[in-house]
Amino acid sequence: MADDHDTVAKEFNEAVNMAPAELEKWLDSDDSKRVGYKGGDGEGSGESVGHKSGRRIVEIKRTKKADLSDDDYAHMKKVVSYVHRHLAQKGPAKDKETSDWRYSLMNWGHDPLKD
């Protein structure tokens, strides 16, 4: 992935296929809060990495491009990498709609059922 901001923004907008309001609604759900990495043992009681990323994605999507920081672009690159890596796993053959695989992707702003 290229480092220039225009390319990063384009790839981010392709990877994140959920609107900010749609993502916020999802992040409020119990399923969203249940999935994802929550610490070294996977049993941490805090917010998952993906859930926290989802909140950041909403902020980025609502920020004017001219006001995005280098840190925002770094996070956008992280989101693109995560979505591409996770999609490559293909998810479960059955029950994809209610799978943790899909729910985890949705925390990162991508609903694979929209593809």
Image (tube, rainbow, N blue to C red):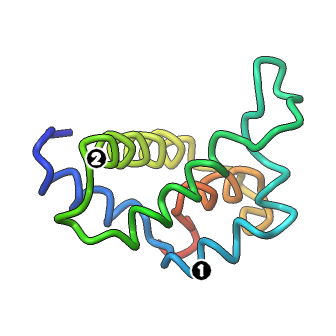
Judged left or right of residue 67, residue 84 is: right
Give the amino acid type for the residue marked by disc 2 in the picture.
Answer: Tyr
Give the amino acid type for the residue marked by disc 1 in the picture.
Answer: Glu
Neighbour class for label 1 at 10 Å: few (<14), some, many (≥20)?
Answer: few
Q: Is residue 91 above or below residue 55?
A: above
For marks 2 and 1, the one nearer the N-term is 1
Instruction: Residue at 23% x, 58% y: name it.
Output: 9
Q: Residue at label 1?
A: 22
Q: Is residue 72 above or below residue 54?
A: above
Judged left or right of residue 66, residue 31 is: right
Instruction: Residue at 57% x, 81% y: name it.
Output: 21
Instruction: Residue at 21% x, 61% y: name it.
Output: 10
**At which x and y percent is residue 53?**
56, 49
**At which x and y percent is residue 66?**
17, 65
Judged left or right of residue 111, residue 80 is: left
Q: Secondary structure at mark 2?
A: helix
**At which x and y percent is residue 49?**
64, 39
Q: Is residue 10 above or below residue 45?
A: below
Disc nearest the viewer among 2 and 1 = 2
Q: Secondary structure at mark 1?
A: helix
Front residue (pair 30, 113): 30
Q: Residue at label 2?
A: 73
**Disc 2 to disc 1, C-alpha distance:** 22 Å
Instruction: Residue at 42% x, 46% y: name it.
Output: 84
